[in-house]
Every structure is written in structure tokens, then in C-alpha cells.
Image (tube, rainbow, N blue to C red):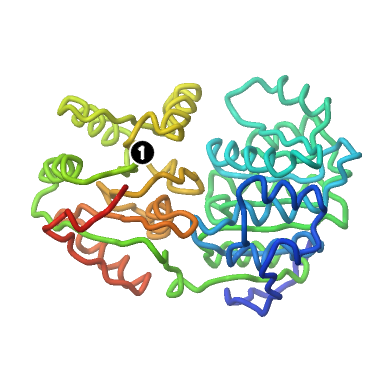
Amino acid sequence: MSAQDSEVVAPVEEEVKVYKTFDSMDLPVDLLRAIFSHGFETPSDIQKKGIKVIADGRDLIAQACSGTGKTGTFTIGSLARVDPSIKKVQVLCLAPTRELAEQIHCVATSLGEHMNIKAYAALGKTPVRDDIRALDRGVHFLVGTPGRIYDLMSRKAFTTEYVKVIIVDEADQMLEDRFREQLQCILSLGFPATCRCALFSATMNEDVVEFANGLLIDPVRILIPAEQVSLKGIRQYRVDLEREDWKIEVLLDLYKNLNIAQALIYCNKRQKAEWLAETMTKSGFPITCIHGDMDVKDRMERMKSFRRGETRVLISTDLLARGIDVQQVSLVINYELPREIDNYIHRIGRSGRYGRKGTAINLLSTDDLRTMRELEEHYKMTVEQLPQDLSVMDLS
């Protein structure tokens, strides 16, 4: 799992064998049974290419847009390599947020059920002793945030001797300053020579490709250039306004006139998210709000409530821009455009998951127009004006 002298390879997709059905992938029978029990019928495009690469013991760097089944790809591929009789960590999965780690844990638990595979999520702001007890009892698939995983490894809470697959999800975010050092420390602590690594993200920048070339051995590359990144099935609209303070009026009007199953509204800062939640609640629209500074238990409870459909609208910062799978979400509203171009695709990818129709509406003040132009140029797209007749939009 090291290739320090590799030269940087341009992010282009290579020829990869395509498996059109799960049955053709030569997966363990019990895993195949769990796949169908979980609700998967036919593999998505990334699953047709990526599952078998991991299952066959190859390093992988893969890019797939949100909602296309990338969590299923690395979970199924890695579980295919697990020996259930060895109650040691065999898959180590790293994710940037606790919400994403919890989601991966749920998928791994479901898919590993018939194989008697134990999945566990190790997350910050919870007692370390609970993690150590769970690991002592036996865990096959360990997922967690970098800080907690590094803490556990430093305490020698589990052995790396049996680790077969390391997964780095949202690799571009994991290589930001706050995670990079922890990630590098984890990978330097020692893994078997036969251990393989898979890097996944909806976006791949030069940092990720260069990092991968220094880490992976002859990796399979499934990469999409920025101009090819699109979210088919997601209709994108804009509402141009002269002033920032007109956005709230438009938002309330949209809420009154659209038939919404569930929606996500994005702000850039906690203060704006809290203000917006308070303003909408006072106006008679019940919503909930979530952000990174919130108490962990409160945050988890609000997410569970939203997933259960008890809350129709969730206001969030970019904490939820990546990897959070709430399949009923039909609408994403950018109250503020994201500061980072890559986060736009992560945000609007919360709607229209797994081939369903979705809608994204961008509320733009005069100050936002330049950013919108940059987004359109980057993704080679044109975002249309929101139609005046909202009755043509079905968001149920």
C-alpha cells in the first residue's frame, strides 16, 4: 500500500470491466442474499465497476456523484473480503463526519447481517471505553471519524494485523488541513502488505490524485473530469433578487406554494441557519435546524426525526452537504451559495437520489451572481430561472 515514487496521473477514467448484475460478481451467497434484502435490485453504474475491483483485492480511486450508490459499492466490495470466523477488524472505513459514519455503519450492518459480520461506528464525543469494549467483543467492519480512529489505534484498542481493506470516503474533504495530518498518521501506523485501499468522493482534485499516487499500488481509476460531473434527474433553478433580505420572503412564498415531500435548506454559517429557522418557525412553518456546533445527542435526534419524516424541512450548514442519504428529499434550496465550488454538487445531490427526480433552487442576491457564473462555467451547465407557474413543479 505504498508507491511513493509514482508520478501524478491525470484524473481520467480507465477501462474497467462492467458487471451488469450482482449475481455475476461472484460474491458470497450470504452477502448476495443481504444485498437483495437491503433493497438493491440491479447495480448502479459505479457499483457495476467498483464492487468487483475491491472484492478482487485491488487498490481503487473512484469518483461518483452523490446518490449513485458509492456507499454500497465500497461496503459490498469490502464485505466480500471479510472472513466472519475471525472476529478482528478486517475493514477500516474513515469518514469526515459522524453523520456519514453512522450512515455507513447502518448500511454495513444491514449488508453484513446474513454473514454474521459485526459492524461498529467509533465516533468522537462519546466515551472511548465504550469503543474499546465493543472492539474487545469482536468487530469485523470498523467505521469512524479520523480523530477517534487515530485515538483508538494509539491506544492499541484493536490490531491492524487482520485489516484487508481501508476505505477513505469523501477523500477530498479528508485531505483538508483539519483531517490531513490525522489521516496520514493513521496510514503510517502499519498495516499488512496485502491490505488494499479505496478512495471515494463525488469530486476529485489534484491533491487527492497526488495523495492516491503516493499511497496506492497500481490502482484502478474510475474518475470523471469536472466538466463531466452532472446530476442527471436534478432540475436546477435560480431566483435572482436585488437584495439579500428579499430571500426570506421568497422562501416563505415557495414553502406555501410548493407540494414538498421533504426539503433541505442550506446556509453557510450557523448564525444564519439559526436565524432562518427561528424566522420560519415564527411565521408558522415548522422546521428543524442542524449544524456542527450543536450538541451531539440533539443533532442525532433531529436527524433521526428528519429521516423518519416527522420533520418536512431541515435547515443545515455544509455539515450535511456530503453523503447523507435521506431518500424522501425532493427539494434542496440554497439560501446562500456555498463558498467552495465542489460543495454545490454535494448539496444538490441530497435530492434526486438513486435515479429519483429532484429539484434544486438557488436564491441569488446581486452579490451571488458572480459565484453562480463560476458554478455554471465549472460544471458546464446553465441554471434556468424558476418558472412563475409553480404548479408545473411536482416535488411530492
- Eyeballing the image, is 36 above or below 149? below
Secondary structure state at the residue bearing disc 1: strand
**Few, some or many residues within 10 Å of mark 1 (<14, 14–19, 20+):** many
Viewer-proximal residue among 175 and 130: 130
Please tell me which residue is depicted at 70% across the width and 37% down the height of the picture.
150
Quarter of the rendering occupied by the N terminus: bottom right
Label 1 belongs to which residue? 316
Position of residue 21 measured from the top left corner of the image (x, y, whole percent): 68, 65
User: Which residue is at a point 69% across and 36% down the rendered structure image?
Assistant: 149
Residue 385: image quadrant is bottom left
Say whether residue 151 is left or right of residue 101: right
Name the side, left or right, on which 237 lies relative to 9.
left
Whole-percent x, y for residue 352 in the image:
41, 55
Taking the view exactly as shown, the residue that stands out farthest to the right is: 85
Query: Where is residue 158 drawn, in percent x and y?
Result: 82, 34
Q: Residue furthest left?
A: 242
- The amino acid type of the residue labelled 1 equals Ser
Compare residues 283 and 274 and report the one nearer the observer: 283
